């Protein structure tokens, strides 16, 4: 099952929750290829209070039972009852069609007739979706090819594989090479790739025109009433994670819709949605979603984009350029330094926090070439949830400059190979002055490395990945 389908099925069947076995969350096991997460009754990731309680209970478990001979027919829909004739009560397993459940949810959100017309031979809008041999494949094939009538070759790598076909199922320009190469040929108008569990997405236009995740969130928000679901329900709020560029903020201000800035993590969005305060949200990590479920939803984002194309009858690139002309452009990038010694990484972050906490740091100026940046604010981001007033601290070190530019440092997950240091750089320009994001952000990148002394402290000469 894909991540959005899990949330859909939990909500549809009013389950008390779902236990998800996935390597994409807290991977464990001898080869780091197994993990467990728990989605609560709302269909979203469980809150810390729940997972902490589970952990406490796990420490008191004295025994467990296994049933090596149990066989469940996974290919036949319906209920199957089992009686193991021991101290356990008889129980029932119900096999459901998760693909149909999820497809039906999408039918009630989007105008499938309009999408089918957009993708018809008459309009000649050709698309290419790459499931990267992950869990999204069957859902993409069902909706795109069977429901919307696209040719079979519109959806590639749709057979889920244990090793993802030898690829890393990460939807970015470096890993989704099959999609990127086919898009650069110019024969497709719209392209998208999904990650292993179908939660994340990358959007491309003709000739491989790349839509940054932060821009994708802002463009969907600005055109949200192209989606019938929001025409009926309205939009109660918009949200982004703190490291995500502030492009969405400008849309929220122009449309007078409440904006929330949260720590990374879908449970923060879910809490706002459950309270009726949030309708649409996204993160810079190729993540987008609405309040139809309580998880990130890569395929939903693709249908949102196709709905915009159907309404505006413009190319992806033209839609982006119109957006930048209207709002200005947030140039945004993320540097990932992977496999850093955990002690070195922690020491650097601690020293960096001491540096930015010093009162003299605010108002300090940094000059690179002809650019001068003055620090307006610096802190370790903390979030007070407007629903239940819980406080989440230590979510990233922020340096905000007087022109609105930002540098953010976060320490990613630590594994057996070390930690990941992430640097986010965000700069706003009212006028479109350059096509090259890395060129535009080079001065801020220089400042970010100077303040942190990252290269000196780690011995690195550059990031492992740039997105």
Image (cartoon, helix red, strand yellow):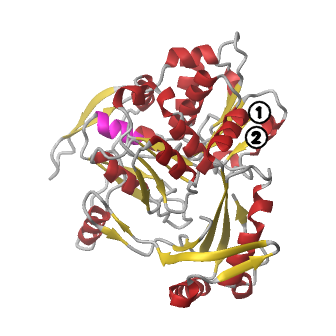
Instruction: Name which quarter of the figure residue 454 lies in.
Output: bottom right
Mark 2 sits on what residue? 209
Q: Between marks 1 and 2, how big is the CA–CA gap?
A: 6 Å
Q: Residue at x 27, y 29 (%)?
A: 79
Q: From the viewer's perspective, is residue 132 above or below residue 404?
A: above
Camera-side residue of 170 and 219:
219
Q: Residue at x 44, y 22 (%)?
A: 107
Mark 1 sits on what residue? 206
Label 2: which secondary element: loop
Label 1: which secondary element: helix
Q: From the viewer's perspective, is residue 249 above or below residue 289?
A: below
The image shows a total of numbered marks equal to: 2
What secondary structure predominates along the stretch shown in magenta?
A: helix
Q: Which residues are magenta?
A: 6-12
Q: Position of residue 240 (x, y in %)?
A: 48, 54
Determine if residue 326 is in view: yes
Q: Is 15 contained in the magenta span?
A: no
Query: Of the numbered discs in the image, which one, if any, rests on residue 146?
Result: none
Q: Is residue 29 left or right of residue 160?
A: left
Q: Is 8 contained in the magenta span?
A: yes
Marks 1 & 2, CB-CB < 8 Å contact: yes
Q: Position of residue 120 (x, y in %)?
A: 65, 13
Instruction: Name which quarter of the figure residue 407 lies in.
Output: bottom right
Q: Position of residue 431 (x, y in %)?
A: 72, 50
Determine if residue 148 is in view: no
Farthest-out residue, right? 185
């Amino acid at each position: 099952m894909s991540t959005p389908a899990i949330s859909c099925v939990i909500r549809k069947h009013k389950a008390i929750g779902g236990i998800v076995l996935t390597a994409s969350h807290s991977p464990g096991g001898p080869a780091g290829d197994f993990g467990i997460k728990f989605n609560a009754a709302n269909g979203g990731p469980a809150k810390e209070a729940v997972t902490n309680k589970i952990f406490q209970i796990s420490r008191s478990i004295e025994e467990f039972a296994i049933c090596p001979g149990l066989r469940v027919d996974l290919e036949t829909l319906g209920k199957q009852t089992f009686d193991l004739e021991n101290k356990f009560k008889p129980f029932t397993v119900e096999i459901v069609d998760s693909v149909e459940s999820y497809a039906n949810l999408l039918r009630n959100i989007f105008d499938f007739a309009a999408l089918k017309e957009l993708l018809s031979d008459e309009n000649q809008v050709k698309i290419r979706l790459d499931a990267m041999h992950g869990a999204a494949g069957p859902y993409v094939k069902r909706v795109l090819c069977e429901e919307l009538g696209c040719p079979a070759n519109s959806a590639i790598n749709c057979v889920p594989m244990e090793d993802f076909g030898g690829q890393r199922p990460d939807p970015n320009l470096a890993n989704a090479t099959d999609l990127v190469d086919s898009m650069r040929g110019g024969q497709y108008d719209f392209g998208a790739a999904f990650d292993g569990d179908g939660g994340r997405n990358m959007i491309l236009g003709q000739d491989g025109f790349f839509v940054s995740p932060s821009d994708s969130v802002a463009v969907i928000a600005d055109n949200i009433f192209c989606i019938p679901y929001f025409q009926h329900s309205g939009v109660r709020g918009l949200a982004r994670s703190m490291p995500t560029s502030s492009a969405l903020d400008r849309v929220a201000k122009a449309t007078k819709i409440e904006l929330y800035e949260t720590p990374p993590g879908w449970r923060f969005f879910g809490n706002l949605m459950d309270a009726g305060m949030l309708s649409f949200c996204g993160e810079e990590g190729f993540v987008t979603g609405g309040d139809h479920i309580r998880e990130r939803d890569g395929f939903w984002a693709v249908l949102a984009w196709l709905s915009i194309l159907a309404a505006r009858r413009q190319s992806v690139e033209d839609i982006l350029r119109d957006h930048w002309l209207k709002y200005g452009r947030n140039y945004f990038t993320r540097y990932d330094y992977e496999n850093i010694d955990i002690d070195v990484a922690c020491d650097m972050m601690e020293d960096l926090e001491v540096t930015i906490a010093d009162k003299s740091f605010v108002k300090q100026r940094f000059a690179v070439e002809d650019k001068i940046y003055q620090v307006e604010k610096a802190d370790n981001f903390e979030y007070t949830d407007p629903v239940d007033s819980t406080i989440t601290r230590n979510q990233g070190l922020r340096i905000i400059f007087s022109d609105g530019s930002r540098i953010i440092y976060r320490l990613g997950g630590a594994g057996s190979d070390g930690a990941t240091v992430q640097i986010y750089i965000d700069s706003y320009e009212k006028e479109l002055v350059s096509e090259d994001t890395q060129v535009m952000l080079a001065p801020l990148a220089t400042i970010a490395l100077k303040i942190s002394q990252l290269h000196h402290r780690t011995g690195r000469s550059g990031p492992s990945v740039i997105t």
